Image (tube, grey):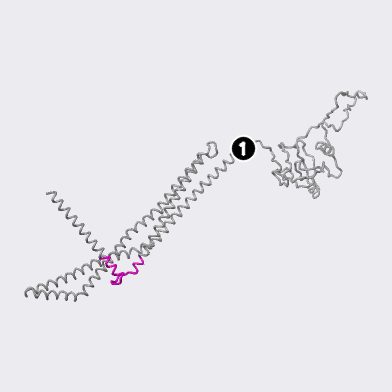
Amino acid sequence: MAETEKGEKGGKGVNVSAGKLAINMQKRLTRAQEKVMQKLGKADETRDTAFEEGVSNFNKQMVEGAKLQKDLKAYLLAVKTMHEASKRLQDCLAEMYEPDWFGKEEVDSIAEDTDMLWIDFHQKLVDSAIINLDSYMAQFPEIKNRIAKRDRKLVDFDSARHHMASLQKGKKKDEVKIAKPVTILEKAAPGWAQGMIAAHQVAQTNLSRNQAEEELGRAQKVFEELNVELQDELPTLWNSRVGLYVTTFQSMAGVTEKFHKEMGKLSQNLNDVMGKLEDQRNIKKDSKTKTPAKSEAASNHNTESDTIPKSPPKSRRPSGPPVPRPPRPSPSREMPPPQDNTPDLFGDAASVPMPTPSPTPEVTVTAPSPLDASAAAEDNAVTNGASDSGDLPPGVLYKVKALHDYAATDGDELEMKSGEVVFVVPFDAPDEQDDGWLLGVKESHWLANKNLSARGVFPENFTQRC
């Protein structure tokens, strides 16, 4: 029994499916026939210009939205790729950065903050742009299906309308077709049956007309419901695109501006760390390499030849007031042996000279005594290896001529141009004089001001005595 019931139900299901399939096939054939008739011009077509314009805008809007969605996803993919590249670069820097270098912790912190900033930037782009755009594009497939359904129902409505019109136009022809069989039946049938046959044929004609009217009414109702809904939705959807574009790109612009601002701060911090690391390297380099107190003169002035001599190094002169230099023996002058000029208090006028040793040369050191300006100048002239000249200003030992340009690198140095004449003067404290350096005043300054106040040191090997 149970198997019999299942078989019956299965047979009913198959019959229902076959019936629906037959109905659908009949509808498709009817629609295809109607479209062919409309294209051939044998049947009129219902047209709605406003709706067609709305459908055209809908298709354009859907294409533009799909392109924007595709390009925006490509942009997000590029952001993700940049994030991965930036992370690899930061990790490479962190691995190479030695622990004893300056700012190791700062570099690690900057790398971590950069990675978090990229992640936040990508997520905010997804939240502010992609989600809204996906929601916007999700409504197009459903509306597109409804537009297609509305077009099918319009064809059904036109077909029903044409069928109804053909029934109304062919009413007289049908009456003629019905009358001919009645005449034949009259010959074969008895008289009482002829009235029944005519009544039956009239009833069938009226039934077909009523069915056509009902079918037309149903098709018109379904079509108008879809048509009214779409006529309200399509203009609203078309206008919504402006709001979507504004919201999407404003959000993207704000998120991007904030991202680049924060990224700029991190980049500046990394730049500062790299600058301090360079300073640290220079300090270590200077501590390992002993450099002279004064750089070479060739690096401090413009040269016209590669044969310009280098200025000798200057030692550090002690600060404070100059200490007078003790007298020293001079081989160029012999001083007479000292005599005892102490008066004889006991009346002995004769003074006994002090004996001097004969085998060794006599070098006598006398106690320091104040010297006048001329004696000091003469002593300094001997110290600098100079000789007196009668045409020099007072206090000048000799004069030299600059062979090369010299650019001063310190406040106490004298800047010279090739060909200038310089008066060499003695140092106030001879201990301040460095080997290979002289103290002088330009001849042009003396001629203009008649004083020797603008003094400065300069390398002797840049000049030639004249």
Dot 1 falls on a residue whose secondary structure is helix
- Residue 340: quadrant of the picture: top right
Q: Give the range drawn in magenta.
A: 30-54
In this rendering, does residue 457 appear at all? no
Q: Which quadrant of the figure contains the C terminus?
A: top right
Left or right placement of residue 186 versus residue 50 in this view: left
Residue drawn at the location 63% of the way across and 35% of the way down: 288
Is 315 magenta? The answer is no
Name the spot of residue 332 as percent of width and height, x first.
85, 33
Left or right placement of residue 293 versus residue 124 in this view: right
361 relative to 387, above or below: above
Name the spot of residue 113 as percent of width and height, x first.
47, 44
Q: Which residue is more in the foreground, 178 or 108?
A: 178
238 relative to 109, above or below: below
378 relative to 450, above or below: above
Question: Few, some or many C-alpha atoms within 10 Å of disc 1 (few <14, some 14-19, many ≥20)?
Answer: few
Name the spot of residue 343 as percent of width and height, x first.
90, 26
Name the spot of residue 348 as percent of width and height, x first.
92, 23
Is 45 magenta? The answer is yes
Q: Which residue is more in the foreground, 182 or 249?
A: 182
In this rendering, does residue 328 appear at all? yes
Q: Which residue is more in the foreground, 240 or 224?
A: 224
> Identity of the amino acid at label 1?
Lys
Magenta segment, principal secondary structure?
helix
- Residue 213: quadrant of the picture: bottom left
Residue annotated with mark 1: 285
377 relative to 53, above or below: above
Q: How many marks?
A: 1
